[in-house]
Image (cartoon, coloured by chain):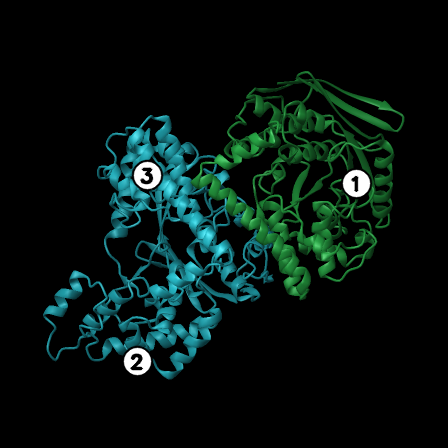
Chain colours: A cyan, B green
Amino acid sequence: MQVTNWKISEQDDTVEVSAEVDGFCLWYRLPRSYPVARAGDPFLAAALLPAMLRGEKLEVDPRLPVSPKLLKNLALLQEIHHSWNPVLKIIPISAQTSASWPVRQGAMSFFSGGVDSTYTLLKRIKEISHIVFIQGFDFFAGRGKDLPFSMADISDLAQIAYKLDVASDAVSVFVRNALSESTRQALSRYRDSCSDPGTLEKALAVDLGKLIAGPPVYREERFAGVRLRPETRRLLERAPEGKSPERLNRLLLEDAYPLEITREKSAVYPTAIERNASFARGLGKSLVPVETNHFPFGYRYNLSRNLSQGGALASVALLLGFPRVFIPSSYSYSQLFPLGSHPLTDPLWANEGMEIIHAGSEARRVDKVMRIAEHDQALANLRVCFNDMNVNCGKCQKCLRTMIPLKLLRAAAVPFPPLPPTAVIRKMRISGDIELNFFQDNLDLAMKSGDDELRDALRSCMARYERQRLFKEADRVILRGLIRRVLRARANTAQGMQRIDTTPPRD
Amino acid sequence: MRIHSWEIKVQGDIQEISAIIDDFRLWFRVPKSIPVSHAGDPFLAAALLPAMAKGEKLEFDESLPVSPKLLRNCSVFQDIHHTWNPVLKIVPMDASTRAAGPLNDGAMSFFSGGVDSMFTFLKRRDELTHVVYIQGFDFRVDDVSYRTAFERNASFVRGFGKTVIPVGTNSNAFGYHHNLSILLTQGSALASIALLLAFPRSYVSSAYSYSQLVPLGSHPLTDPLWSTEGVEIIHEGAEARRVEKIIKIAENPSALANLLVCAHEVVHNCGKCEKCLRTMIPLQSLGVSTTAFPPFPSLSKIKKIRISNDIEMIFFKENYDLATQTGDKALRAALKSCLRRHEWTRLFKDIDKVVLGGFLKRAYRRVRKDPPSVHRVSMIRSED
């Protein structure tokens, strides 16, 4: 795997740094006023896990020196990831080395406005000078939809390849049938080991482009299972006779593949950036917005974001070149499990000029919420929602797990709708042992604050989860998984797509 | 908690370095020829967990400076242990500071002759100049056995051109004095010796791989925090699982012949205990014959092995996977039946816990009239 063709270009008030990694143009854009590191370090960080997955030597363009300290650290980092998931192979890295030094002063922390990053900002408020807000890691929005379809419009190659391969919905059957023979071949080569993503990307872009430019793709039965946007519906209602349906076709495919095909940028990110920037200004800090196409890059190799998050954050930190970098942790030292951002691995992404600190593992989520509740501005700015970056829905797991401690702390002016009645809380489903930890933390607080009603509701969720877990365990040990297999067969669900994660799949 | 009355006494070939920590005199005995640290660092490493358990400020005599880097690291160390077990409180530390440089040249590794330290020894043999063999840490043994075991290890290590440093200490008794579990204190006890000897690089061998991490006194997150300006402490070997270490050791006949893993014996391997068996099983799978262990027991005996806990189960699974790889079907079947039995036992316990609220466990204890066992302060909160 090669890192080549490093470029820096300026446009209006933005500076873009890019390089070709395995044929993919990976880029980062930030305000022009910020200096950036002109070394290979950021791209080495981004490319490491994909290269490990492919078991390929990683070669960095000799004109693009990398830090010797980073190179040394990556040997250990590779050992840790390989030990967690042996599908990630230990690979050699070839690069010219030259020590890297900070390109600016101060200390930065990554910031999304959620519980972890707000806690770290408050705890390190004296030291942190900049907070960095990334767009293009949680999801990816791209160019205008009127431009011809290209490779850059595919945001999740692994998932669209999986859907076209399995073809279990009507749209995918239709698209699959429209693919050229060479695209199908590229698809089957890619399927098993994510090999040669470049060829598949190009071929898919051509075929999807033809579909969009061709006759109307809409049939009622074909799109029966697809949730259409109001805009698509409007266009559909007044489908122009005889006119090219290109725009409608594109919207329909975007709706059928909402995460896999890039949408036009909406106001979501600018709104989030504006809110967080004004919060930062209020605290005397600067917000650095960084845009990247790391989301499609990671999914080119089917890497779960749990796995690729460490390298993604590190690449941005190495690009910005602050001497101290805080990466807010999601889990406490007592809840550690293999994860892309981990107190063992995060510090290893550093070069001579910086220290990377995995911050906040001394606190559980509930401790962090307590700290935030003491700070009016931070509390007002808190956004944790799974569904919306700008408004807390008050219904998803992440909202609820944050609203419960806020209610117990009797926090006023919370940026959430009112907590639903306990009957609703009682019905919350716990998705796994990690989620169980958060329930336990909230239960501890409910017991301390003497709220018997919430305490009982949380207890009953946990008891239900424990019974379910016991049932599954009994099925596994006594019946060797018979019930699970029967249920799966009945639901007629093929095993869903599995991303490459920090650990091997369980079954 | 106050650390004072530091002294160094020479008797024959041995120098004894000691200090009084509250009411306990903690000592280390090292050959006179080896330069040792005169700073407070080794005693800081030994006293921090006891001070945290008591929730008391840790104070040092003016004359006993500690490394500023170590002092900074100790606050992260405290964060980690407090998060693991809140019984261990975060305490302030009061000491004068002075940067600590190395006192010896080269690199050292702790060495017991077991799988973990043998693996580190082989992996780092080009770099290592010394190995440290501790008396009074892992087990309390009589002098004759200790000397026999020491001589055995020393002659093995000398064969590689390395020097053995025997170190005696009562740090184990010190930990028990504060009712701390040895699993909790093992990391800091080793660190105190590494800081006393002050080699620029000191290796602490890991028992578990990165994929098997659990809160433990010696851990890749905490061990490096004991480093000072001049001494780097490295948690070594966590990239390998136990079977991988054994495979590496089996490639070296002299290392294999010197392997000493027994939980019961000091001079040779009994071949019956959990630790012996978990080492003999992979050697059997690999078809390696060795005089280090008694003959391999019959498969019917293997089938009866009780897996005592989930950690032991991890080692068992590794051994099972290896038997699958090497195609030893009979051994694989025997291991499988142990694993199945353990799963059934665990399921039974879970049913009791979730459905009956632990009724059976309490009833069983009452019937057996078991005296309550000693609860030592450990890495995590006690469940009962």
Q: Residue at x 26, y 46 (%)?
A: A390
> What chain is tagged by disc 3?
A
The label number, if any, that marks residue A402 in the structure image: 3
Q: Residue furthest right?
A: B12
Spot occupied by residue B333 in the image (x, y as percentages of width and height)? 64, 60
Spot occupied by residue B312 in the image (x, y as percentages of width and height)? 62, 47
Spot occupied by residue B164 in the image (x, y as percentages of width and height)? 82, 40
Residue with the mark numbered 2: A178
Counting other residues with Cα less than 10 Å from the Cα at mark 1, is it few (<14), some (14-19), or many (20 or more)?
Answer: some
Q: Are marks 1 and 2 in contact (CB under 8 Å)?
A: no
Q: Earlier in the sequence, mark 3 or mark 2?
A: 2
> Which callout, 3 or 1, points to the residue nearer the camera?
1
Q: Residue at x 25, y 48 (%)?
A: A271
| Label 3: element kind | helix
Q: Amino acid at mark 1?
A: Glu
Q: Are marks 3 and 1 in contact (CB under 8 Å)?
A: no
| Label 1: element kind | loop
- In depth, the one of A441 and A290 nearer the eye is A441
Q: Amino acid at mark 2?
A: Ala
Q: Residue at x 51, y 42 (%)?
A: B349
- What is the spatial separation of the Cα atoms under label 1 and label 2, in whole angstroms? 72 Å
- For the question of whether residue A324 can be seen, the reply is no
- What is the spatial separation of the Cα atoms under label 3 and label 2, in whole angstroms? 46 Å
Counting other residues with Cα less than 10 Å from the Cα at mark 3, is it few (<14), some (14-19), or many (20 or more)?
Answer: many
The label number, if any, that marks residue B265 in the structure image: 1
| Label 2: element kind | helix
> Which callout, 1 or 2, points to the residue nearer the camera?
1
Q: Amino acid at mark 3?
A: Thr
> Residue B356's quadrant in the figure?
top left
> What chain is tagged by disc 2?
A
